[in-house]
Amino acid sequence: MTATAEPEIGRARLRKEDARLITGDTRWTDNIQMAGMLHMAVLRSPMAHAKITGIDVTAAAAMPGVLLVLTGEDVAAEQGSLPCAWPITEDMLAPPAPSLAVDEVNFAGEGVAVVIARSDYEAHDALAAIDVEYDELPVVLDMEAAVADGADLVHPDLGTNKSATWVFDSAEAGTGADVDQAIADAEVTVTRTFRQQRLIPAFMEPRSVVVDPGGGSITMWSATQVPHILRWMLAAVLGIPEHKVRVIAPDVGGGFGGKLQVTPEEVLTLLVARRLGKPVKWTESRTESMLSAHHGRDQIQQLTVTARRDGTVTGLKVDLLADMGAYLRLVTPGVPILGAFMFNAIYKFPAYRFTCVNVFTNKVPTDAYRGAGRPEATFAIERLMDELAVELGMEPMELRRKNWIKHEEFPFTTVCGLTYDSGNYEAATDRAMELFGYDELRQEQARRRESGDPVQLGIGISTFTEMCGLAPSRVLGSLRYGAGGWEHAAIRMLPTGKVELITGTSPHGQGHETAWSQIVADRLGVPFEDVEVLHGDTQSSHKGMDSYGSRSLAVGGTAIVLAADKVLAKARTLAAHLMECSESDVEFASGQFSVRGTGTSTALGDVVLAAHVAHNLPDGMEPGMDAECTFDPTNFSFPHGTHLCATEVDTETGAVKIRSYVCVDDIGEVVNPLIVEGQVHGGLAQGIAQALFEEAVHDESGTLTTATLADYLLPSAADLPHFTTDRTVTPADSNPLGVKGVGEAGTIASTPAVVNAVIDAVRHLGVDDVEMPCTPMRVWKAVHQGKERGVPTTPVAAGGLGSIDAQGGAE
Amino acid sequence: MIPAEFDYVAPATVEEVVRALTEAGEDAKVMAGGQSLIPVLRMRLAAPNVVVDLSNLSELTGVRDDGDSLLIGAMTTHYEVQRDHLVRDHARLLAVATDTVADPQVRHRGTFGGALVHADPAGDLPAPALAMDATMVIVGPGGRREVPAREFFVDYFTTVLEPDELLVDVRVPKLTGWSAHYEKFNRVAQAWSIVAVAAAVRVTDGTIAEARVALTNMGPTPVRATGVEEALVGQPATAESINAAAARAAEGTNPTTDGNADAEFRSHLARVLTGRALTAAVGA
Ligand SMILES: Cc1cc2nc3c(=O)[nH]c(=O)nc-3n(C[C@H](O)[C@H](O)[C@H](O)COP(=O)(O)OP(=O)(O)OC[C@H]3O[C@@H](n4cnc5c(N)ncnc54)[C@H](O)[C@@H]3O)c2cc1C
C-alpha cells in the first residue's frame, strides 16, 4: 500500500461521483424497471378548500390497462396520518394529515384518488375519467386575515387557524434583559415589517417512488434525502414492522430540503403495492411537484430594534406569522423556530424577544427549504440594520462593526443562550471590502446620484452567521424535536486493504462520496481510489439521520474521523504485537506503522490482513479491523461571512442588474475547496433568486398560478453575475476537523445583500422597501409612485409559456 | 406531463400534409419545431387525434432571394434565420429579433413559421413580421392564398389559418440598407417578452426618411405603432425627435395585466423601450 503524496484534506479533487451523475450512467428512481411493475397516477384537487360530496370512479376503472382506482375512503382505514416530528409546543394544534383526502380537501393539489395501471400513460388517461363532486368552502389564504377574529377556518374542528405560538424571551430565559424595558428606554427605535415570499424548492429531479412488496418484506426506492427517517416513519405511520421495510435512496438529483419529507405518495405507493402484490412506481411531473411538494419560507416578519444614538443596539423584538399551509408535515412547525436563534445574528443584543404564531392556510404545506428559518432571520436582521443605519445617519458597515462580536470575545454566549465557538467577523469583512472595492463603489454611487443618472448604483451588505451542523441531540430534545441529531459511520477494512465507508448521511448532489473518501484516505493513509462510500440504503447503512441542515460534514464527517481513529487504535495494538514491540513505540504515518528508532515497519494493509485471517492475534482480540462510531455533537457550528453586492437599478424600467458580488465566507477548515465553491455558487444562485426572481403565487381561489418553470422563474447562469468568492479560516472548536458546514451559507447570506443593494440604489428617491422578489414592476412603482402611495403588495407571477398559463389560458 | 394518445404521421410533401389535415378535420395539429406544441400537449391543454409532423418537408426550409423580397420557408429554424446572410442584409430586424428568442437549444428546433402561426402575444417574431409588412403564403385544400401580416393575426393564439391550411412561406419585402433594433424586456434570459419593440429606420442625410415600429405583447396581437412612425418621418435623427415620437408608443394599444406587468407599466415600458429601440437603430 502506498502513501498518498499530497495531503487529502484540503485538496481540490474533482468529484468521483460526477461522471455517472452527469452522464446518467446511474439509476435514478424513475429509471428502475421491474418485471410486472405497475404505475400510479394521482388525481389532485383543483379546489383549495372543499367538501368532497361524491367520487365516481366507475368509468376510470373500466379504462384500458387500469387495475385499480382508489379514493381516500378506500384507504382511510390503513393510511394513518402523515407524521409531524416537531410538535413545537405542548398545546400545538395539528389536524389529521391523510395521504389521500377523505371527505375534505384543504389545498389545491391535494390528492383525492389514485389510478394504478399497466402504463404511466394509461394511468394518466384514466385520471380524466374520475368524476369528483366538490362543495366549495371559504378559502383562507392571507395569514393576517386568518388570525383575525371571525376568520374563516381551514380546519373548523380546531376552532382557530393558529397552530401554535412559540416564544423566546431573554429576560424569562435568564440570557438577557427585558426587551419591553429596552423599548421604553430607547433613544432610537425602528420598526419594520418584511414579507418572506413563498418559495418552491425546485430540485432538478422530480420525486419518484418505487415499491417492491415481494419476498416477505417491502423495499422502497425513493428520491428522498432522508431514507433512514423515512423507514422509521413508514413503520410508525403504517404500523409495518420496521425490520420488514427497507428504504433505498439511490442517486438523488437535488433536494434543498424539499426531499426532507415523508410524502403522501410514498405512503400511497406502498399501500397500493402491498394491496396488489406487485411492484408499483409513481413519478411526478414538474407541475405536480410544484403543486404538491412542500414549499418554503412564507412569513410576515415584524421587527423592532432599539439603539442608542451612538449606534449601540439595545434590544430586538421579533413577531412572526409563519404560514404552515394546510397541514403540518415532517418538520413544518419547527422551521421558523430554527430561525428564532438567528435574528440576533452576529450582534450583541442585550435584550431579545421572539414570538412566532404558526398559521394554517389553504395552501400546500411549507417545510424545510435550504436554510430553513435561518435565511428568513438573516434577511430580516440585515435589512433592519440598514434601516437603523439610515435612521442614525451612520454608515451601514460602521453600524455593524460597532455591534458585532469582536474576534477576541469568542467563545461568546448570545442573548439566545447559544455559544458561538469561534469566528472573526473583522477579518472576513476587511477582505470582502477590499475585494469589492467598497470605497470606490461608494464614490461612483455618489457621482451617479449627483448627475441623476437613470441607472443608479446600490451597495448591499450582509454580515451573516448561521447555526448548522444539526444538532446536539439534547438541544433538539429541549426544542421538542422528535429525533436525535447524531450521525453514524462505519468503516469496513477489507482483506485486500480496500476500504468501505458506510455513512448515515444521504448525499443528493453534495459530493459526499468524494469528500468522505478524502477524509478516510487522510486518516488511514490509504489511496483515495481505494475507498468506496456506501450510503442511502437502510440495509447496508443501517443507522443514520440523513442529510440536511449543513450537518453532513460537521456531524457525519466527525463520525468518520472517530471511526477511523478506532481502526487505527486497534491496528496499532496489533502492529505492536506483530512487530513484537511495545505499543508506545509504534508510530503511524502515511499508512505505515513503524517502531520508533528502528527500520522495522509494517503497512496498515498487512495489519488488516493479519486481523482478517486471525492467525496471530493478541489474546482476547476479535478478528477483523472494522470499526464504527456514532457521534453526537456538543454544539452547533457557526459559519459566518461578509457578502457585498453592487446592483445597477434602471430607474426607467425598474430592472435590476447585479454588477458585482463578493463573498468571503468563514466555514472553518475545508476538506475540498472545489466542493465548497460549488456549494457557495449554488447557494448564492438560490438566495439571489429569492431576492429577484422566485415567488409562488396563488390567485384568490387558492390556485397556484406559478406551476411551471416558465412561470416560476429560476435564474440560469445567464441571469447571474460572476461571483468573487474567498474564505477566511477560523476553525470550529466543536469537532476534530474544525469544519462548520457550507451547504446553506450562500442562500442564507445573499438575499439581504441583494435587496439592501436594490434599496440603497433608490433610497434617495424616497424608497425604503421593495417586497421580494424585487421585480422590475415593483421597483419601478416604488421609485415612481413614491413610498406614500405604497409599493404593490400583490404577488406576481412570471411569464408562463409565453402567454399560456398553467391553467390552460391558451389553445 | 404526459400527453394524451395521438396518431402520428410525417408526410413528405405539402399535398400529403393538406390531405392528412383535411381527412382529420379539427382534430389534427401540425407540428413544426414542437417547441410550443409539445408543451401544450404534455400539459394536456390540447389533445389532437393526429399530429402531422412537418419535419420531412425539406422544401419548406431555407431563405430564397425573390427580387424585391425574401421568401423564408416556414420550416426554417430560428438558428438558420439568425445565420442567414440574406436575412442579415435585407431583413436585419428579423435577424436581430430572432437573436433574442429563447435559448440555443430552442432556436435549433423552433421555426419561423411555427412562431408566427402560434401567434403568442408575447412571442418575438410576429411584431417584426408586422413591421416589415410580411405576407403569409398559405396552402390549403382550395389551393394557395397570400395574407398580409396585418390581417394574419386575429387574436390571442389565433390567426386566419383554417385547420386544414398550412403556412408554407413568408414573403418579407427587403429593407436593404435600413438599420434596425429589437428591444426586448424580460426577467430571465430565456423568457418571452414582457414588452418588446421592433424598430427599423432608413436615415438619409441625418433625416429619418422612413420608419417602421411594431410592438410585442401590447395587445392580443402585435401592434403597429403608427403614431410613432408618423411622428418620425421627415424629422432629424436626434434624441429629441425620437423621444417625442416614442411618447406616442402606447397609443391605440390594449395591453394586458399579468403578474409581470400591469397595463400601466406595460404602456410605460412601451414608451421607454421604443425610445431605446429607435436610438439603437439610428445609432447602428
Ligand atoms: C423554453 C422556451 C423558451 C422560448 N422562448 C421564446 C422567446 O423568448 N420568444 C419567442 O418568440 N418564442 C419563444 N419560444 C417559442 C419558440 O420560439 C417556438 O419555437 C415557437 O413559438 C413555435 O415554433 P415551433 O416551430 O416550435 O412550432 P410548434 O410548436 O411545432 O407549433 C406551434 C403551433 O403552430 C402550428 N404550426 C407550426 N408550423 C405551422 C405551419 N407551417 N403551418 C400551420 N401551422 C403551423 C402548430 O400546429 C402549433 O399550433 C420558446 C420556447 C421554449 C420551449
Image (cartoon, rainbow, N blue to C red):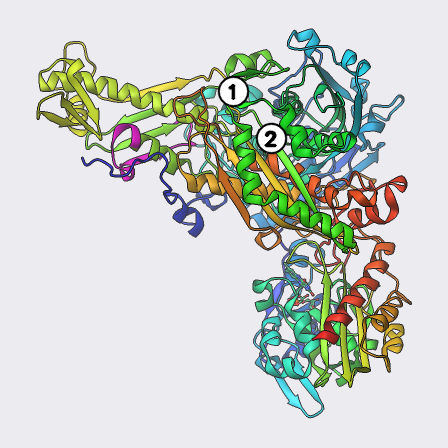
- Determine whether, in the image, residue A492 is placed left or right of residue A803: left
- What is the x, y in percent for residue A708? 67, 49
Q: Is residue A566 magenta?
A: no
Q: Is residue A523 magenta?
A: yes
Residue A604: image tag: none
Of badges 1 and 2, the one in the foreground is 1
Quadrant position of residue A272: top right
- The CA span between labels 1 and 2 is 18 Å
Q: Amino acid at mark 1?
A: Glu
Q: Kindly give the residue lying farthest to the bottom in the view shown.
A: B67
First in residue order: circle 1 vs circle 2: 1
Callout 1 touching callout 2 (CB < 8 Å): no
Tell me: residue A124, above or below residue A595: below
Residue A464: image tag: 2
- Determine whether, in the image, residue A285 is placed left or right of residue A597: right
Q: Are marks 1 and 2 on the same chain?
A: yes
- Determine whether, in the image, residue A796 is placed left or right of residue B227: left
- What is the x, y in percent for residue A400? 65, 29
| Residue annotated with mark 1 | A408
Q: Of residues A721 and B221, which is closer to you in this image?
A: A721
Q: Of residues B151 and B270, which is closer to you in this image?
A: B270
- What is the x, y in percent for residue A778? 79, 46
Whether ligand 1 has any atom under 8 Å from the Cβ at mark 2 is answered as no
Q: Amino acid at mark 2?
A: Phe
Q: Chain of mark 2?
A: A
Say what secondary structure mark 2 lies in: strand
Q: Is residue A293 visible?
A: no
What's the residue at 39%, 49% (across, down)?
Answer: A19
Numbered range of the magenta stretch: A522-542
Ligand 1 quarter of the rendering? bottom right
Say what secondary structure mark 1 lies in: helix
